[in-house]
Image (cartoon, rainbow, N blue to C red):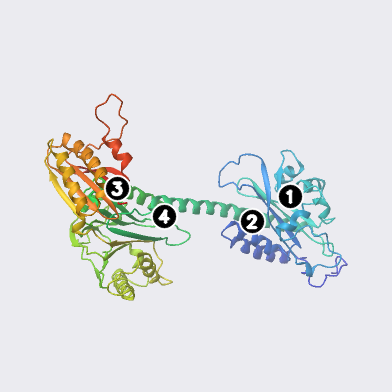
Amino acid sequence: ERRSGQLTAPGRPTPMRRDGDRLRFVGAATRRIARGMDLDEIVMGLCRATVPTFADAILVYLREPLPVGDERPTGPLVLRLRRTDRIPAERDTENGFTPAVQPEPSELETVGSELCEVRPGSALAEVLRGVRPVFTDTPAARAALPELLGDDGDFTVPDGRRAILAPLRGRRRVIGAALFLRGPERVAFEADDLLVAAQLATHSALGIDKAVLYGREAYIADELQRTMLPENLPRCTGVRLASRYLPAAETARVGGDWYDAIPLPGSRVALVVGDVMGHSMTSAAIMGQLRTTAQTLAGLDLPPQEVLHHLDEQAQRLGTDRMATCLYAVYDPVSHRITVANAGHPPPVLLHLGGHAEVLRVPAGAPIGVGGVDFEAVELDAPAGATLLLYTDGLVESRLRDVWTGIEQLRERLAVTAQLTGPDHPPPLEALCDEVLDMLGPGDRDDDIALLAARFDGIAPSDVAYWFLEPDDTAPGRARRLARRSLARWGMEDLTDSVELLVSEVVTNAVRYATKPVTLRLLRTDVLRCEVGDDVPQLPRLRQARATDEGGRGLYLVNRLARRWGATRLSTGKVVWFELNRG
C-alpha cells in the first residue's frame, strides 16, 4: 500500500481508497440489507455486507423491546446485543487484535453483558443522541464504550481510528447501535469511512423499522384470521366435520373467505362458506361482519334463502361495493336431507359412499350485495356415508384454468381418492381435505382457499322417538311414560329416573304457557338427547330459587343433572334440550 507504507496481509481484503470503491460498496451493501424482510435477515445482511469488506468484526445492538411505528417507548432505553460477526480465526494474523467478539453467545462474556441500560445524560446517551457515527478514539466515544461493552470492554477495542460507533436511528428515534472494528494489521478507518458507516446505519435502521412494522402487521393478520374463522368446529350429532384455510400468500395472510358450522335445534347443523371480494384487511373486516350476521340469522332458525336475503341487505348497508358470494346449507340427520341456497358461489360437490362424486345442481343466484334479487332453496337427499364439500373459488379457479374446469378436476380427484378406500368405507375426512388441497399446482394460488367437508352419518329412525303432547296438566305424566317406554326399548333403563325427572320439569315449563301442542323428541346417539319444543318464543333463564318459593327449581335440576343443556329460539317458538351420557 503506497500511501500507508503497509502491506496488506494475505487473505485480507484490499482497503477501499477511492470514492468509487466506497460508492460501489455502499450500493451493494444497501441492496443486500434491503433484501431482508424480517428482523434477522436485515441484521444478518448488515453483518454479511460489512465483514470482511468494510470491517473485520461488527457488533449490532438493538433496543429491547423495539418500538413499533409511532409507539412511544416506556421505561428506560435498554440495548441488547442482537448479532455479531467477524473474520474467521484462521484468517487472523498472529498479531491480530484481542478477539472481543465471537459468533457463539457463550463466548460473548469477554465483551460483557448482552444487555446495557443507557442512563440519561451518560456518555453513551450523548453519542446516540448525536446520531452521526464517531471514531472511538474521541473522548466521548471512549467514555461510552464501557457502558456499551461492559467495564472491560474498552480494552478489547483496537487503538486509533480502528473502531466506529454508529447509532441506528429509525424514522423517529434511536433503535440501536453498530460497532465496526478493524484489526491492527489492517489500514485504519478514514474520515470518508464515517460516511459509509452512516449509510449502512441509516439503511439498516430503516429496514429494521420496516421489519418490525411488517411483523406487527403479520401478527395482526394472524390474530384477525384466528378470530374471524372458527377456532374449533363444533361436534354435531349425525355429522363429522373437517376444514382447511389457506391464505393467498404469506404477505396477505387473511382475506375475505370464511366457513362456519352452526348447530341448530333438532340436531341439525348449518354449513356455511362465503367469499368477500379481495383479500385485504378491509375484506377480512367485511367478512367478519357477514359471518357474525349469518350466525345471528342461523340462531333464529330462518330458512336458507331467508338467511341469504338478510345477508344481502346487510352487505348493502355496509356499502354499495361490498360484494360477496355465499352458500348456506342445513343438514337434518333425522330426515337425511339437506336444504341448500346459493348466492353466486361455486356449487358443492357430494361424494357418495360408493365413490361416485357429483356436482349438486343448485341455482347459482346473484352475489350478496347486488340487492333486489330472490334466492331459491332446494332440498336434496343426504345419504349416510356421503361427504359434502363446500369450498371457495380459490380452490378451483386460477390463471391456468377456469372455474368449471377446476370443479371437474375436483370431482375427479374426489372419485379417485374414494376408490382407494373401497366402496364400503369412505375416505377419512382429514386425509380427504389434504388430498383435495394437493390438486393445487404451483401456479394455482391466486386467491384465498376455504374448505369445509361434512361427512353425513345421520341418525337411524330406530334411534328417534317423537311425540306431540297437548298443553294440559296431563302432559308431564304422559311424557314420563313415553320416555320410560323408549328407554326400555333401547336398553337404557339405568337412565330412567334421571330422564323422567328432567323431562317432567322441561315439559311442565313448556305447557304452562303454550297454546299449541308441545313436541317431545328423544335421540339416541353417542349420548341421549331430549328436545322439547313449544310455541312461546321467550327463552327460560336459570335462576336460584329462594327457600320460600314453590317453583323455579326445574332448570336448576336440569343444569345439575344433565351433561349439557340449552334453549334456542325458533321462528315458531323455541326448543329446550338436554343431553345425558349413556353410561
Percent of width and height locating residue 213: 54, 51
Rounded to the nearest angstrom, the CA distance separating label 2 from label 4 is: 28 Å
Name the image quarter holding the N terminus: bottom right
The answer to whether one can see residue 308 in this image is: no
Mark found first going from the N terminus, 1 or 4: 1
Q: CA distance from mark 3 to mark 4?
A: 45 Å
Marks 2 and 4 in Cβ contact (< 8 Å): no
Q: Which residue is mark 4?
A: 280
Marks 3 and 4, the one that precedes in the sequence: 4
Q: Give the label, 3 or 2, closer to the camera.
A: 3
Residue 386 image point, x, y percent: 26, 66
Question: Which mark, residue 204?
Answer: 2
Q: Nearer the viewer, mark 1 or mark 3?
A: 3
The mark that comes first in sequence, 3 or 2, is 2
- Disc assigned to residue 580: 3
Q: Quadrant of residue 83?
A: bottom right
| Mark nearer the viewer, 1 or 4 | 1
* Circle number at residue 113: 1
Q: Earlier in the sequence, mark 2 or mark 1?
A: 1
- Where's residue 19, x and y in %? 73, 64
